[in-house]
Each structure stands twice: as structure tokens, then as C-alpha cells.
Amino acid sequence: MIKRTIDSPDRVSEKSNLGSLDLSHLSFERQLVWQKELTEGTLKRALKQDVKVLDTLTDNNPFNYRNKVVFHVLEDEFLQLGLYTTEPVKLVKVDNFILANKIVNEILTKINKAKIKVDPFKLKHVVFKNNSQNQLVVTLVSTNKNFLGKDELISLLETFKQVIGITINIKPNDKVILGHKSYEVSGTSELKEDELYITDKSFLQVNLPVMKMTYDVISKNITGKKIIDAYCGVGSIGFYLYKKNPNLTIDMIDNQVDNILLANKTKRENDYKSVNIIKDNSEDAVEGLSADTLVLDPPRQGLMPKLVDTILDKKFKEIIYLSCDLKTLTRDLRLLTSTYEIKTIQPIKMFPQTTSLETLVVLKLK
Ligand SMILES: C[S@@+](CC[C@H](N)C(=O)[O-])C[C@H]1O[C@@H](n2cnc3c(N)ncnc32)[C@H](O)[C@@H]1O
């Protein structure tokens, strides 16, 4: 058993037992250094070459940055929302979550006090999503469209002017948080972030200021005119690049129909003529496209072997790879560096107080 005897000068508190705050005992300055050193050490070892890693990109805002929070319903007669601890894994009530938006915390406190009778085997989660203007869409995730406490909870949420919409999402099984089916029960199910449309099911980075800083770095590193934005989601990277430079031609690819519909809506409304939106797997679509710059933002699993082969074959002028998983990024870089050389490695503090890592790598054709 390991016992703590002397505290590190970088320790700022006891370690939180909430799984979502697993680095909050470390000072924020040290969290930035930790991320840089971990990225550098991991890539150096795996790639067997000296890699230069930039200082971690940050907006210096360590709290209340999340624009999406999923709270879970405790097994209780009255509605109580909380989060999971680690060791032991346990669901505990939370009235103020230090990473959530301030309005979300106000609503959370009110819900937990309201004594709304609920069936915790039907209503499982309450998801809050907000945009930069502090408008919120709240999603009630339930095994059934109807559940005890539904009307009372909706009425409570409607008292907050910031809540512009409420949806009910049907949870099909315990393996996923959200299912495919959502119903609008109040206001709108669509939230707008700048020109982008998002719904309860779409992906958007959870830290909007740092997301925009990251996209500025991507934009500055692009030298080509013809771009592929693979794994585009609702188009957050592609549209951002296009707005910065309307001379670009961009092919965006995502395999989720909902994302494609929302991306098309943004394209139509803004008349983004030179943006082409493709619903397909990136590993299939990239084969048939040509571009100077390939932007990649895959899910945790990283790139499929077929896409790696295509990238090696196609010899793009440059690749910009945004990753949320250092392990799969490392695996993919080991393969890509046979043909491409690493220009910059930029760690990004997208998730302060946590050990989750976001990394941006710029590669050039050798
Ligand atoms: C990490 S998200 C990035 C989304 C977007 N770039 C953003 O930042 O908002 C990954 C996206 O890849 C999509 N996706 C997952 N597997 C895919 C595949 N094989 N081909 C194309 N898109 C895929 C998901 O639907 C999701 O929108």
C-alpha cells in the first residue's frame, strides 16, 4: 500500500472522488506542464525520435467551462441528480459541479430541492447543453416517453428563461447514455453556436473558448486551398476555416445522418458555396477525393487501417490531426510518420481538472 507522507507543493486540495475531476488536486499551472510532459514523453518513446512539444494551449479558465454536462438520477423517491465517484464507483448527489455553467448549477440546485416524485428506473439522466450566449437545451433521458414527474420537471425547467428547449430522449439500453430517438417537448431542440446548429445528440467540443483557440491554430497552419474535413460532425472545424478564408474549397465527411442534416442547414443558411458535405465513412470517402490539406478529428478509436493506407498513398501536402486519445494518436503517428514528418505537436487544455487529453498535430509530406 502506498501512503502519502509529504504533500507536493503543486497539490492544491484533496483528490476529488468524482471521476470527472480526477486531476483537480493539482494546481492548474502544473496541470498544463503535466500534459505537455506526458505528451512529449509518450510520443518520444513510441516514435523513437526527438519530438518538440509546444506549451499547452489554454484560455486560463480552469472552472465552469463545460457546455455539456450529463447528470445521473439517483435511486430515490424524489428526483436527485448527481455524478459518479471512483473507488468505489458510486452515484452521489451533486448540487454544484465546478465544471458546469453557472446557470446549470442554479437549475441543478433547484431540481435537487424541488422534491419531484420520480421513478429512477425510467428517468435515468438529465443532460444540459448550453451555447456561448448561455442558452440551454435540456434533455430528459428516459426508458419511456412518459415517466413519473415529467410535467413537474418540465414546468420547473421552463421557469428559467435561459432554457430555450427541452427534449426527451429514449434510452434503449444501459450501454449508451443517449439513444437515437429524441422528442421536442418544449421550445426548440436546436441550439445555435455562431452559425452552427447542434441538438442533444450532436458532438461539439465541451469547452467553446478553447475550441475556437484550437481552430485558430488549425487555420494558421493551413497552407493549401483544397481541404478535406474528415469526421466533420456538424461542421464546426470546416465552417470555421471557411469563414476565416472563403477562398477555400472544403469537402466535409461524417457518417451520422443527423450531423449531415444540421451541417447542410448551416451551409444553406449561410450560402457557403464551396463547402461540399458528404455522408459516408471517412475511410471510404477520402479514397475518392483529392486535397492539399487533410484535417482529421476522429473519435477515440482513431483512424481505421484503411484510412491510414489511403493517407499514405495519397501523399497530401499536409495533415492536421486533432485527437482526444493520446494512445490511438500515437499508434496512428507511428504509421503516418513513414511518409509525413511532424511539424508541430500542440497539447490543448480542453478539459481542465481532468486527465483527458486533446492534442493537435501538424504533419507535412516528407
Ligand atoms: C470527435 S467527433 C468530431 C466532430 C467535429 N469535428 C467537431 O469537432 O465538432 C468525431 C465525429 O466523427 C464521426 N464519425 C465516427 N466514425 C466515423 C467514420 N468512420 N467516418 C466518418 N465519420 C465518423 C462522428 O459522427 C463524430 O461526428
Image (cartoon, helix red, strand yellow):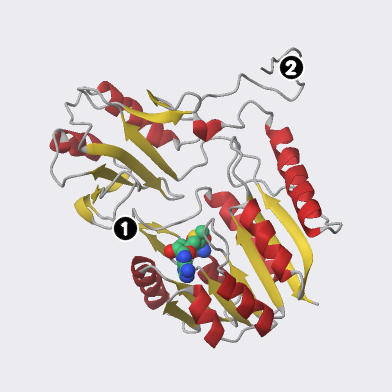
- For badge 2, the amino acid type reads Asp
Q: Nearer the viewer, residue 32 or 297?
A: 297
- Asked if residue 327 shows in the view, the reply is yes
- Upstream in the sequence, badge 2 or badge 1? 2
Q: Nearer the viewer, residue 245 or 229?
A: 229
- Asked if residue 233 shows in the view, the reply is no
Q: Spatial distance from mark 2 to mark 1, Cα to Cα?
A: 47 Å
- For badge 1, the amino acid type reads Glu
- Asked if residue 302 is positioned above or below residue 104 in the image, the reply reads below
Residue occupied by mark 2: 7
Residue occupied by mark 1: 190
Residue 237 placed where, x, y %? 54, 66
- Asked if residue 173 is positioned above or below residue 9 in the image, the reply reads below
Residue 246 placed where, x, y %? 57, 79
Disc number lying in front (2 or 1): 2
Which residue lies at the image location 25% right of the left edge and 55% below the top edge?
188
- Asked if residue 334 is positioned above or below residue 10 in the image, the reply reads below
| Quarter of the view holding residue 163 | top left
Residue 52 placed where, x, y %? 83, 55
- The reply, left or right, for residue 127 in relation to residue 116 is right
Using the image, tell me which numbered label, if any, was put on residue 118: none
